[in-house]
Image (cartoon, grey):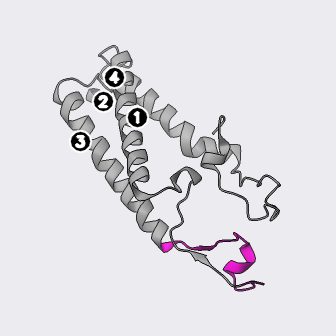
């Protein structure tokens, strides 16, 4: 998001209609962005190092890639399903959505949540596959950095 915000953030509904002016981007607040993206990754990583043992054997070589594929298929199917349900006017004017249009409305019937997904289906499949691969490789890296034993020891077995 820091390097290319236009790939993540959709145009704002109050973007200028003049094609020479750059579109305004619809930003979410920094707090919401941190809550959605950074905090889950940070807290799950802390939990992994404090309470979990390093994953070995089939957990790493078979189950983790399988789970990456399952979640990628589930997430991409959900995004594609919702994209078909969503619709918007081509002009992106918020008044068209409530029926106060001053022109003939041309509906776009496949609306994805991120501009980088506004590509033909095969390219979106490649993006989903790349995201699943990135997730799996991140797991492998975090697992590689793990010392093997949880930092807090056998906290779960003391109960």
Local SS, label 1: helix
Local SS, label 3: helix
Do the CB atoms of the residues marked 3 and 2 lie less than 8 Å apart? no
**Residue topped by disc 4:** 143
Determine crowd level at label 2: few under 14, some 14-19, many 20+ residues with C-alpha closer than 10 A: few
Name which residue lies at 50% across and 68% down.
110
Please tell me the numbered disc located at residue 156: 2
Looking at this rendering, what residue extends furthest in the left direction? 58
Residues at marks 3 and 2, CA–CA distance in whole angstroms: 27 Å
**Residue topped by disc 1:** 134
Give the camera-side residue of 135 and 142: 135
Please state the horizontal and vertical placement of residue 11, each as a whole percent of the image. Answer: 70, 57
Do the CB atoms of the residues marked 1 and 3 lie less than 8 Å apart? no
Residues at marks 1 and 3, CA–CA distance in whole angstroms: 14 Å
Local SS, label 4: helix
From the image, give the main secondary structure of the stretch colored magenta. Answer: loop
Q: Residue 141's quadrant in the figure?
A: top left
Number of the front mark, 3 or 2: 3
**Residue topped by disc 3:** 66
């Amino acid at each position: 998001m820091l390097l290319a915000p236009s790939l993540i953030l959709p145009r704002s509904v109050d973007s200028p209609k003049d094609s020479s002016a750059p579109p305004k981007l619809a930003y979410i607040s920094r707090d919401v962005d941190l809550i959605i993206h950074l905090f889950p990754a940070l807290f799950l990583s802390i939990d992994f190092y404090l309470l979990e043992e390093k994953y070995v054997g089939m957990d790493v070589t078979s189950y983790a890639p399988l789970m990456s594929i399952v979640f990628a298929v589930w997430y991409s199917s959900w995004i594609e399903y919702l994209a078909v349900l969503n619709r918007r006017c081509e002009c992106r004017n918020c008044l068209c959505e409530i029926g106060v249009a001053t022109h003939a409305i041309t509906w776009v019937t496949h609306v994805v949540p991120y501009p980088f997904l506004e590509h033909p289906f095969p390219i979106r499949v490649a993006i989903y596959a790349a995201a699943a691969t990135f997730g799996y490789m991140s797991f492998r890296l975090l697992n590689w950095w793990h010392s093997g034993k949880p930092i807090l020891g056998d906290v779960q077995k003391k109960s």
